[in-house]
Amino acid sequence: TSNKEWFLPWKTVEGETTAPVSVTQLEVLLKGVFEKRRLLDLIRYFIVFEQERGTPTLKKIAGYHQFHAVNYALEETIRASKAKGASVHDIKGVYKAQPMKGGETGDHRIGVIWHTQGSGKSLTMAFYTGRLVLHPAMENPTIIVITDRNDLDGQLFGTFSRCSEVLRQTPEQATSREDLIEKLKGRKAGGVFFTTIQKFVSTSESGGALSDRHNIVVIADEAHRSQYDFIDGYARNMRDSLPNASFIGFTGTPIEHTDANTRAVFGDYISIYDIQQAVEDGATVKIYYEGRLAKLELDEKEKPKIDPTFDEVTEGEELEKKEKLKTKWAALEAVVGTEKRIGLVAQDIVDHFEKRLDVMDGKGMIVTMSRRICVDLYNAIVALRPEWHSDDDKQGVIKIVMTGNASDPQEWQAHVRTKARREELAKRFKDADDSFKLVIVRDMWLTGFDVPPLHTMYIDKPMQGHGLMQAIARVNRVYKDKPGGLIVDYLGLAYHLQKALATYTEAGHPSEIPDQDQAVNELLKRYEICKGLFYGFDWSKFFNGTAQEKLNVLPQAQEHILKQEDGKKRLLQAVRELSLSFALAVPDERALAIRDDIAFFQAVRAALIKSTVEGEKSAEDIDQAIRQILSRAVAASDQVIDIFAAAGLKKPEISILSEEFLAEVSRMPQKNLAIELLRKLLNDELKMRMKKNLVQSRSFTELLERTIRSYQNRTLAAAEVITELIKLSEDMREAQKRGEKLNLTEDEIAFYDALEVNDSAVKVLGDDALKSIARELVETVRNNTSIDWTVREAVRAKLRVMVKRILRKYGYPPDKQEEATNTVIEQAEVIAKDWAG
């Protein structure tokens, strides 16, 4: 199953719009998903099991936007391809979707699905293909997936290959023009094929149309530009080769309002899922912007050569093919890539990225405008941090990913890799735990390359529109507690970013990326909330006191919080939100100025998590609390989070709960903290006992919960609660010794307790008989359990018969035998895990 950050809400019932906030999430889920037909569809068509090489298999299920978009696209495909048959079924509407405007039967225009980058567009395409393949009206269609670049073709093909179960067949990739012709020419039905649009040749070269069937569907990924040139381009070749095919466009970027071409080819929108909606749903994280201009120094004679607006200088991968822009690009590249400027940018990136890593582990990407600058910037960075370099692809913190050939300069050759080597680097970069943290690229990895731990992108390349939005979306992927992505701009792209965003949101959503000032303002607001929780408390000794004084501050701080109504809950939430805000605001000086205070708040939070029992504390919470002890001056984190050392106590042998340790706890001046500490220790001890002695641990758990309720309801004073908890600890210690007194093993005493729970049995039989039953039960259970016995009803039934036979043999009260048998079987399930293993 995917990680918990991917458990997202279902936000629509009928699919037309999101449900109003007045309707509870549970009601939306029940009505939106558990309507019989929708639920069956969701299970049958919208679950995949994905596994990338070397990673665990993940089960993924469609989100509401994917589910409704696919079902509507299926309806429109049947219409556009003249397929015969009824509609999908009676589902009213889709989320942000409608029948394609102006669509006519047999017009071969299915429509456009715009789902913003990072929201699962590739999986939506796979779900759609799976539905087409199985729908009887499509009569076993042929699906052709088109991209305009080899790396996109490979990435999308990889996603479909990992989802072959939902496709009911293995997709194939055309390796050449000849291979594409061979795969398609004369094909009668079926098949899922991947190709770039450049592999389509004119019909004169291929010997006529490849197929005139109507049940061919062409899926265009990132539908724009390359599919428009009908006069003499590749799109013309594709259309001539497949004259009756129907076309659907999938894009992470919207159709511009002035763009008639996309609508002419594919039709209008079927479904929209924009940036703002994806962030609101948690499907992507928010992106923040930070401008850090590195000034361009221009010679007077160079100025006339450069277009100062950069309007024509857009996406490098396309510019190099356009002869008329080569001169301008080269002139600008020379200015951007001066030795002095590269040195400044390198120093800034190193300082900035190291500060980011201090508070948030993850990855960074640097985007430059030429391969020369890639190499020069790499050399400048490793000159500052030599330990980041390695000649070995399996080692090193920083790498360049770029294409090249044998004619490139010698100093570039170390960075030119084969496709297989680049794939190995990609695998390293996607691994959050790998030391490969920073990559330099020109064009590669900017589209269709998902790295959830990537949180910072440094852009030093003129970009705008589609290419800019594709690039920055690399940092918007959801990953654990990642609070957002950060775009660091060295060339002043803010105007182009805002201009692009104007068309990237719909339905009245504000079209802006917040700058870092907003992140800092949010941080300062949350900082004041945390300060308020410590009003009247002096924590200065935490920073300037002796080592012992620093430790003494923590129990006093915890006591200060625990005295407040819901103080612990409020602090844990407030400091978590503060930490996430801090991770976004770093390395702004205003954020760094309060870093030590944040370190103190986090130290208290970590200590409370360590010393208390809270159901909502996840492993991620604890990891974050420990990881983000920010000030290096206070980062002796063993001391910071060790509640025993902080409270001036020797760490106890918890399984024993010695009298000496309990006496120390009872003398603690911080009574609320002492209660939380005892509660934590007792709870941990009971969890351990639950694995051995079910009845005993249940009994003590009830007593513990009753005592804590008295404390929470304030019916007992803190000192009285401590006395009760210490008495409970002593009783638990005595219970541990009962086996020795009765001459029973640990396993035998567990079954003895299971029988003794019935008072009348004790009176009738006495200790000796109960001990004999316990010993015989241990022997019987041990000899009749297997590894999977708890899920094999026949074995369980046989064991129940044996238990009842033993109870009757020793005269166990008949009216109590059923209850005793159930308890014994429960105890056997707990204890037999060790035996069967």
Image (spheres, rainbow, N blue to C red):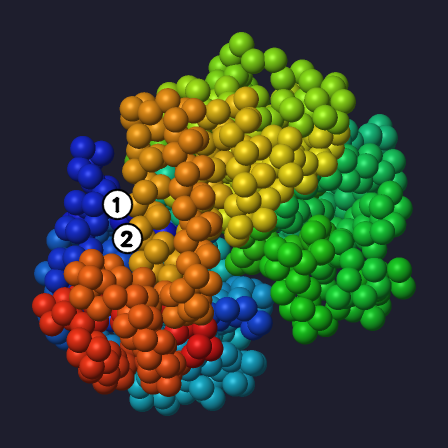
Three-letter code for the amino acid on which mark 2 is drawn: Tyr
Q: Is residue 70 above or below residue 134?
A: above
- Tell me which residue sits at (58%, 66%) in the image: 151
Q: Is residue 228 visible?
A: no
Judging depth in this view, the residue of 176 and 582 nearest the camera is: 582
Judging depth in this view, the residue of 207 and 80 nearest the camera is: 80
Pointer 2 residue: 64
- Tell me which residue sits at (42%, 19%) in the image: 564
Judging depth in this view, the residue of 431 and 781 nearest the camera is: 781
Q: Position of residue 464 (x, y in %)?
A: 57, 41
- Tell me which residue sits at (27%, 49%) in the image: 10
Asked if disc 2 and disc 1 are in contact, CB closer than 8 Å, the reply is yes
Q: Position of residue 397 (x, y in %)?
A: 76, 54
Marks 2 and 1, the one that precedes in the sequence:
1
The answer for how far apart the CA atoms under marks 2 and 1 are is 7 Å
Three-letter code for the amino acid on which mark 1 is drawn: Lys
Side of 65 relative to 595 (left or right): left
Under circle 2, the secondary element is helix
Side of 304 relative to 815 (left or right): right
Q: Is residue 56 visible?
A: yes
Specify the quadrant of the image occupied by residue 765. Answer: bottom left
Q: Is residue 418 above or below residue 528?
A: below
Pointer 1 residue: 11
Judging depth in this view, the residue of 44 and 344 nearest the camera is: 44
Q: Position of residue 720 (x, y in %)?
A: 39, 26
